[in-house]
Amino acid sequence: MMEISVCAKNLSYAYDGVNVLENLSFTVSKGEFFIVIGPNGSGKTTLMKIIAGLIKNQSGKLEIKGQPIKKYKRKNLARQIAFVPQQVPTDFPFVVEDVVLFGRSPHLGTFGLASVADISHSKQAMKFTEISDLARRRLNQLSGGECQRVFIARAICQTPNIIVLDEPTASLDIAHQLRIMDMMEKMKQEKNITVIMVSHDVNLAAMYADTLMLINRGQQVRVGPPGQVLTYKTLESVYGCPLIVDENPLDKLPRVTPVPGRYIKGLAVR
């Protein structure tokens, strides 16, 4: 029987009486690459924060590894889940190796002193994310892509079973996007870590996700393999713009192409 990392039933959340999430239900298996997609304002960031335990779900149930999230103490939950936010701080003059070592916080003893084993974990995380050469650099001396890898290294150093990422490839160039996504795939394959993330790039999501969940205005539209979720009819109804959905020549997965206005006249989009 496949182990379940996250199980959500009828999750809902509202800000000032306005629903942001409504009755979301889904499961994420251990070692699965689960990607959430949808238009701006769909509630994706709120969902990531709920899964990571940063905010409490207002209704519905959320279980982490078979146990209600509300039963976890903060430190114990941090041993299970690491969170990488969309906007990572880059203006702090912290040294990279210290930032990565912060990931060991949930595992430190009473006096908060890092052990030889903790330092070993941090070095392994930096090696895995290919930032060992940046160890003595300060965050405010790094590029956006380098900073993103530093905070992913910190999450790995936390040795979680689940890593939650809110748009980790936002504002990165194509090469850095692929580097981050390959890193997530490698974590899944080599460490059997469950990866849950938000992406605005439906084509990247299609190439990497085991499961996609499409949400719109806080509601769940469809959950399943990329081929079942990324259909023209579904995407057009959600995004409200002309699209062409065909087959990616690399692996026969769906490929989504937005159609600029100058091409629309006389074009039958299917």
Image (tube, rainbow, N blue to C red):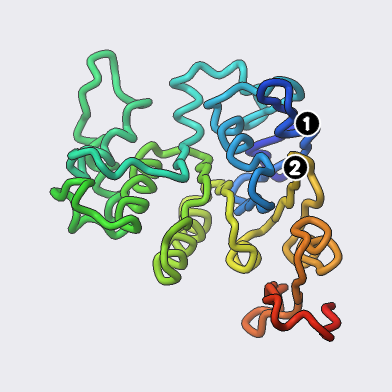
Q: Residue visible at 55% across and 19% down?
A: 72
Tell me, yes or no, whether the two marked residues, 1 and 2, touch with CB atoms within 8 Å. no
Q: Is residue 75 left or right of residue 226?
A: left
Say which amino acid is labelled 1.
Lys
Name the residue that disc number 1 marks: 9
Question: Gap between marks 1 and 2, in whole Å?
Answer: 18 Å
Q: Is residue 76 left or right of residue 14?
A: left
Nearer to the camera, 215 or 125: 215
If the image is split into quadrants, where does the C terminus sit?
bottom right
Considering only vertical position in the picture, is 105 above or below 111? Answer: below
Considering only vertical position in the picture, is 58 above or below 207? Answer: above
Q: Residue visible at 82% across and 78% down?
A: 269
Say which amino acid is labelled 2.
Arg
For the residues carrying marks 1 and 2, which lies nearer the camera in this image? Answer: 2
| Residue 215 image offset from top left, x and y in percent | 74, 47
Nearer to the camera, 219 or 155: 219
Considering only vertical position in the picture, is 15 above or below 267? Answer: above
Question: Dot 2: what SS?
Answer: loop
Name the residue that disc number 2 marks: 217
